[in-house]
Image (cartoon, helix red, strand yellow):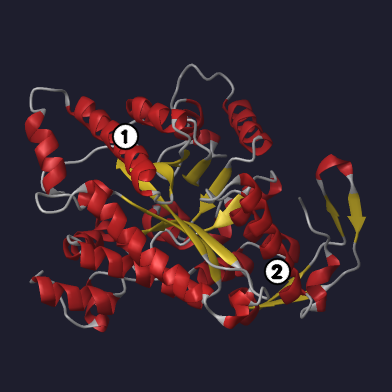
């Protein structure tokens, strides 16, 4: 796949500095994208199970599937296009059902890393809701330790390669982000069923909030006790009717215990959802943030100037480098008015110089890879060489890296050096200076 893009003759950078560039024809091939070091900061573990593994585990654990061939599952469940969000979410019922023991969790964690490594991804943050896997025979500790075992084993296998050990290629790294749910209903998991039963006289939202706080407390305790690389806390689920503010206590606890925060926001609701995520929940990054710049989606009647509100919000996010985790394929599949990527808000985000990075969301459910996501950006959103570099490097710089600040700086430096090594093989990509 080859995309030909003409670079602009002049590009403006922060601080008013301008670099005059000659007109250049840049060829960004799929081969190049695969070679470049990449991140996946927004990838759901339960949405990224290999179909072959799903079939094998379903047969072993007697989980009924609508088909026991990959082709059949692609036709019936894990499609290229979905009619609505409910259809999109159907596949999670099957993947979660086979991830109810340590062996399966470890295997899925390992294979997610392995699949990512094969396409040049050097850092991932696997996110999932541990409470979906907790039951009478499987504790929260065992769930998180099992996933970590698989991911660590994949990391160790990759980093034993001669190219990595010699220092020529940067190593593979990972961390874990735990997800709280904005709401849940009976039947999702034994853990959630127990919470609803034990708090049957409480308003549902209070139970949702308590469950999120319990997860935050568990994540902090387990991280300290076992040294697991749990670096982030997330909030997922339907935004409409379930505001982020309901989970303020959980995120305050995570904040006070130095967990980084990312929040699904602005995917199905407007800018106010994002505002609440960064103010009430201390969000360091935003999952999706699709409608950040859409003033028409504001609901609060007290906002007198919708356009100014959106501009101020974007300015706040840009100034603090709060990164938006962009998932193009997922947006096309779940947001009805984003079927055409040529109109995706990422164009406006780039114009506002917001910090963005490409993510898969769900490798299996969305049938995508990081390479696919970047290729879509190049093809549909006029991304040039500097856009490509900026988005990729932002992923590493804004990651919830599990090591110290100095270790992260050293790792990012190695990534940049390796990026420039690959870039040197493509002279046209060297016309644009790097950005800090």
Q: Distance between the residues labelled 2 and 1?
A: 38 Å
Q: Please report the residue visible at 62 percent of the width from the left and 80 percent of the height from the top.
A: 163
Q: Position of residue 48 (x, y in %)?
A: 35, 66
| Extreme residue in the front direction | 225
| Residue 201 vertical position relative to residue 178 in the rendered view, above or below | above
Task: Please state, as top left, top right, bottom left or bottom right, where the N terminus lies in the image.
Answer: bottom right
Q: Position of residue 256 (x, y in %)?
A: 45, 28
Q: Mark 2 points at which residue?
A: 419
Q: Please report the residue visible at 12 percent of the width from the left and 75 percent of the height from the top.
A: 60
Q: Is mark 2 on a helix, strand or loop?
A: helix
| Residue 249 vertical position relative to residue 39 in the rendered view, above or below | above
Q: Position of residue 315 (x, y in %)?
A: 66, 33
Q: Which of 376 and 432 is in front in this view?
A: 432
- Answer few, some or many: residues within 10 Å of disc 2's Cα (few below 14, many 20 plus, some between 14 and 19): many
Q: Name the residue under label 1.
A: 217
| Residue 177 vertical position relative to residue 295 in the rendered view, above or below | below
Q: Where is residue 263 in the image (x, y as percent from the top left)?
A: 43, 40
User: Viewed as shown, does residue 136 lie left or right of 173?
Assistant: left
Residue 27 quadrant: bottom right
Q: Please report the residue visible at 73 percent of the width from the left and 66 percent of the height from the top.
A: 417
């Amino acid at each position: 796949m080859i995309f030909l893009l003409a670079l602009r003759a002049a590009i403006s950078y922060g601080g008013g500095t301008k670099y005059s560039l000659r007109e250049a024809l840049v060829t960004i091939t799929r081969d190049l994208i695969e070679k470049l070091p990449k991140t996946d900061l927004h990838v759901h573990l339960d949405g990224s199970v290999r179909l072959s593994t799903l079939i094998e585990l379903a047969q072993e654990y007697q989980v009924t599937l609508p088909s026991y061939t990959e082709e059949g599952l692609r036709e019936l469940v894990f499609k290229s296009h979905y009619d609505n969000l409910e259809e999109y979410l159907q596949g999670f019922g099957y993947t979660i059902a086979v991830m109810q023991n340590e062996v399966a969790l470890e295997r899925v964690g390992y294979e997610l890393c392995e699949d990512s490594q094969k396409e040049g991804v050097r850092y991932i943050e696997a996110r999932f809701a541990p409470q979906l896997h907790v039951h009478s025979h499987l504790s929260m500790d065992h769930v998180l330790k099992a996933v970590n075992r698989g991911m660590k084993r994949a990391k160790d296998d990759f980093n034993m390669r001669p190219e990595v050990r010699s220092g020529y290629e940067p190593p593979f790294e990972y961390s874990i982000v735990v997800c709280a749910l904005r709401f849940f209903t009976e039947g999702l998991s034994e853990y959630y069923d127990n919470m609803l039963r034990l708090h049957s006289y409480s308003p549902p939202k209070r139970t949702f909030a308590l469950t999120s706080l319990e997860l935050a407390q568990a994540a902090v305790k387990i991280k300290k006790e076992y040294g697991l690389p749990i670096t982030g806390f997330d909030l997922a689920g339907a935004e409409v009717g379930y505001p982020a503010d309901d989970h303020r206590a959980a995120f305050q606890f995570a904040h006070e215990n130095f967990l980084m925060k990312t929040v699904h926001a602005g995917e199905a609701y407007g800018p106010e959802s994002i505002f609440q995520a960064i103010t009430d929940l201390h969000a360091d990054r935003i999952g999706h943030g699709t409608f950040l710049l859409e003033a028409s989606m504001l609901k609060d009647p007290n906002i007198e100037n919708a356009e100014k509100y959106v501009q101020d919000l974007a300015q706040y996010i840009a100034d603090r480098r709060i990164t938006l985790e962009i998932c193009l394929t997922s947006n096309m599949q779940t947001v009805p008015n984003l079927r055409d990527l040529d109109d995706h808000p990422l164009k406006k985000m780039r114009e506002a110089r917001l910090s963005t990075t490409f993510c898969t969301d769900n490798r299996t459910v969305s049938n995508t890879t990081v390479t696919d996501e970047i290729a879509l950006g190049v093809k549909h959103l006029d991304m040039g060489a500097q856009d490509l570099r900026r988005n990729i490097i932002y992923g590493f710089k804004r990651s919830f890296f599990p090591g110290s600040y100095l270790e992260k700086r050293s790792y990012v430096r190695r990534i940049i050096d390796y990026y420039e090594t690959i870039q040197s093989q493509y002279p046209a990509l060297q016309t644009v200076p790097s950005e800090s």
